Amino acid sequence: MLNRKPHIDQFKTLAFFACLMSMLVTNLIHGQQDAQYTQYMYNTVSVNPGYAGSRGHLSVAALHRSQWVGLDGAPKTQTLNVHSPIGYRGAGGGISIVNDQIGPTSETYLDVDISYTIQTSLNARLSFGLKASGHLLDIRFSELNQDITNPGGPDPTLQQDVDNKFSPNIGAGVYYHTDKFYIGLSVPRFLETTHFEESSLSTAAEQMNFYFITGYVFEVNPFLKFKPTVLTKLVQGAPLQVDASANFMLNDKFILGAAYRWDAAVSAMAGFQISNEFLIGIAYDRETTDLGRAVFNDGSFEVILRYDFMKTKGNVKSPRFF
């Protein structure tokens, strides 16, 4: 007789997440502020600390994104993260560095993630994560004040830069997964810190970003896997971001996919699992707004490298598709 308990557990977990999401949607103005990723499904620990250690071994990933290439001051993002299980009692930990540059603004985050995982059934796990971070903010206002023909002289409110302002923060996330399915809800940074420079009358504010992620891997046949995924990001004062993607993995080696960012962009993705340990992925975005039709905008490019220090003995398992 088949054991139906895992299906019941999964249904209860899905209902729990649905209730949380309905509460968030009815109480928030939607939008975006954190760094943006197209290949978020391979960079999950950056948005959800519950993911730390969930791969079952030490995992290292590095990502670079150049957005709106050709536009002066366009966003550039680099991330480096390392995470692994800790001990044998469901604990996991990780460290991430995120550097995000937009025009004269540069932000650097150093994150420490701690997770605790409960095995809810034979193949299902529920993880709770905490994120502690330090944030460095640098804004070079003086670079915006280049009009030497101004008869009134330089604008005095733009002469004092924000120089490496430090602020601490905390975040949390919940992450549930099986061998083929995952779902998560997280807020990487709870504290809405406001940086105020009295001398320059300038203000820079951090806001909470809410993330909802989910995906499922369908085994079409022994050689082909299909994985649809969704990411939803909400933040007050900016448009709702919804990323939906469809990825195919052939022979556990080659990955091809496409994505749509609601009312914003379309993307193409490709990846190659060089070995069971080493993955390389690339992505290209093209804006569907007026910005995408601008002659100076060549689109957005992203590359990710991931290496898993696997300790599998005996029969080698195929690489997990998330």
Image (cartoon, rainbow, N blue to C red):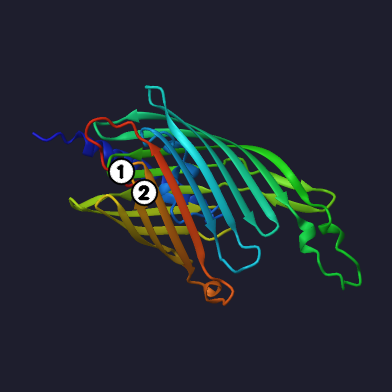
Work out whether 161 lies above or below 124.
Answer: below
Q: If the image is split into quadrants, where does the N terminus sit?
A: top left
**Label 1, label 2: how far apart the Cα atoms are:** 19 Å
- Label 2 belongs to which residue? 214
Q: Using the rendered image of the protein, determine whether residue 236 is visible from the camera's viewpoint.
A: no
Horizontal side of residue 196 vs 188, given as left or right: right
Q: Position of residue 152 (x, y in %)?
A: 91, 69
Q: Amino acid at mark 2?
A: Thr
Residue in the foreground of this view, choosing between 17 and 136: 136
Q: Is residue 185 visible?
A: yes
> Which label sits in the foreground, 1 or 2?
1
Amino acid at pointer 1: Pro
* Figure quadrant of residue 89: top left
- Who's the residue at 50% across and 50% down the image? 63
Disc 2 element? strand
Q: Which quadrant of the view contains residue 84?
A: top left
Q: Secondary structure at mark 1?
A: loop
In depth, the one of 35 and 249 nearer the eye is 249
Residue indicated by mark 1 = 319
Residue furthest front as drawn: 274
Q: Is residue 36 above or below residue 144?
A: above
Q: Residue 195 at x, y = what percent?
A: 72, 46
Residue at x 70%, y 40% (from the top left corner): 166
Which numbered disc, 1 or 2, marks the residue that appears first in the sequence?
2
Q: Could you tell me if the residues under marks 1 and 2 are in contact, i.e. CB atoms within 8 Å? A: no
Looking at this view, name the residue that lies furthest to the top: 88
